[in-house]
Image (cartoon, grey):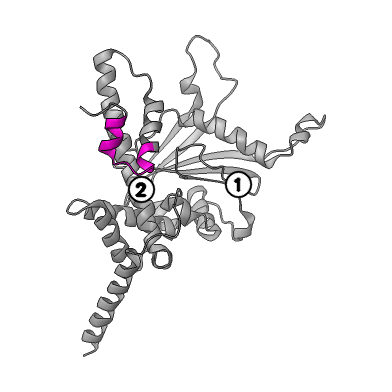
Amino acid sequence: MAAVDIDVNLVNQRQNFSRLLIMPAKRKYKDSVFTSLFSDKKRLLELYNAIEGTSYKDPNLISINTLQGVLFPNRQNDISFTIGDKVVVLIEHQSSINANMPLRLLIYIARVYEKIINPKDVYKQDLIKIPRPEFIVLYNGVDKYPKEKILNLSAAFEQGGKEKKPALELSVRVLNINKGCNLKLEQGSKSLAGYSAFVAKVREFGKSCSLKEAIEKAVIYCIDKGILQDYLQQNSSEVVNMLYTEFKLEDAKAVWIAEGEARGEARGEARGEARGMKKLFALWEKGLSLAEAKRKLGLAR
């Protein structure tokens, strides 16, 4: 009898979750699920400790100073924060890692320093102290990628100079957070392990149903299994909308790059990719389907 009661409760619970999932989101989200999840200082501190092997205890040591819409168009996929004597830029990346990430982060960190430093201080004669920057990219895409890799700004420098050591360098640490790829990180951060498991479930379910249904099924599955349970219970409809938008944007980006490369090979040029992608995303966000946006931009065959 007890087993029957448990099953009935579970069915009722799933029905309640399903009703939550079909409720419209309260606002238009530009945040990613990653940014929404780790904007909570407790989760962010746990994640940072796991990445760096530190043992900070007080979440109030973190001061979040994320810039809006600098690294990624139309969505927020990064978190910038200070902790101790460091300023950290933390990014979750689902598409192929962009080789220009160090250059983009150079521009980003300059703007962060402008935000956290009094502009008048740079004109003082005495040396002012600034937090040491750290750049971390968490890769969560479907392509094969090493457990860890370092990207350096100096790789982009023209090869005409003979300097042994560049006058300017910026290093980005890329960590593969796909489920099972970085067990040490997963063990150190329950929230990160839960997030990786959730995304993996979406992809698994997506093999046999629509994207929206896959996300909804993954939300229910993870709540049932105690994976990110509190977060998903409180934000179920928002998570569905955010992740649906993220995955659709990645699909659009992949299509655009593939078609851009094909045209570039045929014409011997690849100019305009960034401008075209931005226009494609803008039309998609205005409500046009990907096919309609492509036709409007003259990309449909």
Q: Can you tell which of label 2 and label 1 is closer to the viewer?
A: 2
- Specify the segment rendered in magenta: 283-296
Q: Which residue is mark 1?
A: 65
> Which labelled disc corresponds to residue 217?
none
Task: From the viewer's perspective, tell me whether residue 278 is left or right of residue 163.
Answer: left
> Taking 68 as reference, is 187 above or below it?
below
Q: Position of residue 231 (x, y in %)?
A: 43, 64
Is residue 289 inside the magenta stretch? yes
- Tell me, yes or no, if residue 67 can be seen here: yes
Question: Tag 2's secondary structure?
Answer: helix
Q: Of label 2 and label 1, which has the lower sequence position? A: 1
Prevailing secondary structure of the magenta residues? helix
> Taking 165 as reference, is 300 above or below it?
below
Q: Which residue is mark 2?
A: 245
Considering every residue shown, the one lying at the far bottom of the view is 1
- Tell me, yes or no, if residue 225 can be seen here: no
What residue do we see at 46% from left, 49% from top?
31
What is the three-letter code of the residue carrying label 2? Thr
